[in-house]
Image: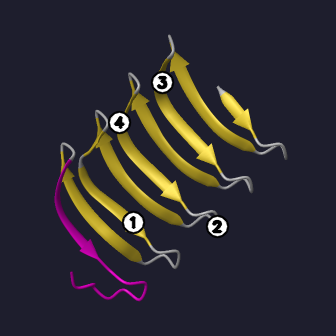
Amino acid sequence: MTFWYQNGQKKEEATYKNGVEIGIHSWWYENGNLKSKGSFNQGEPNGLWVYWYENGQKSGEGVLKNGKQDGLVTEWHKNGKVAEERVYKSGKFLSKIEWDDEGNIRKN
C-alpha cells in the first residue's frame, strides 16, 4: 500500500497480508527525503529501524524484536554527532550514555 503527498512525493509505503503488516514499512518527508524505515513480522515491529531528520541526516537507529527494543539504540544530534546510546534487552532498559552537541559526555 502506498500513500502520496499532494505534491506527488511518496509519503508512506507498507505491505499487508490478510490485514496484517509484514515486511518493510517506509515513511518520507514531503521534500522526498526518507523519514523512517523498519520492518514488521506478523504485525509486530521487528528488526532494524532507522530514522532521519528532514535534511537527510540520520537521527536514530535501533533493533526491535517482537515489538520490543533489544540491543543498542543510537540517536544523533542534527550536526551528526552522537547524542545518546541506550542498551535494552527484550524491552528492558539497561544503560544510557548522553553527549552534548559538541561531543562531550553529559553527567547525569
Is 30 drawn above or below residue 45 in the view shown?
below
Q: Earlier in the sequence, mark 1 or mark 4?
A: 4
Q: CA distance from mark 3 to mark 4?
A: 11 Å
Q: Residues within 10 Å of mark 4 (few under 14, many from 20)?
A: many
Q: Amino acid at mark 3?
A: Glu
Q: Amino acid at mark 2?
A: Asn
Range of residues picked out in magenta: 92-108
Coloured how? secondary structure
Q: CA distance from mark 4 to mark 2?
A: 26 Å
Q: Earlier in the sequence, mark 2 or mark 1?
A: 2
Q: Residue 31: name its quadrant.
A: bottom right
Residue at image mark 1 = 75
Q: Earlier in the sequence, mark 4 or mark 2?
A: 4
Residue at the location (22% across, 85% down)?
107
Residue at the location (53% across, 20% down)?
16
Circle 1 — which element? Answer: strand
Q: Residues within 10 Å of mark 1 (few under 14, many from 20)?
A: many
Q: What is the number of the mark on residue 55?
A: 2
Relative to 25, is 84 on the left or the right?
A: left
Q: Amino acid at mark 1?
A: Glu
Residue at image mark 4 = 46
Circle 4 — which element? Answer: loop
Residue at image mark 3 = 21
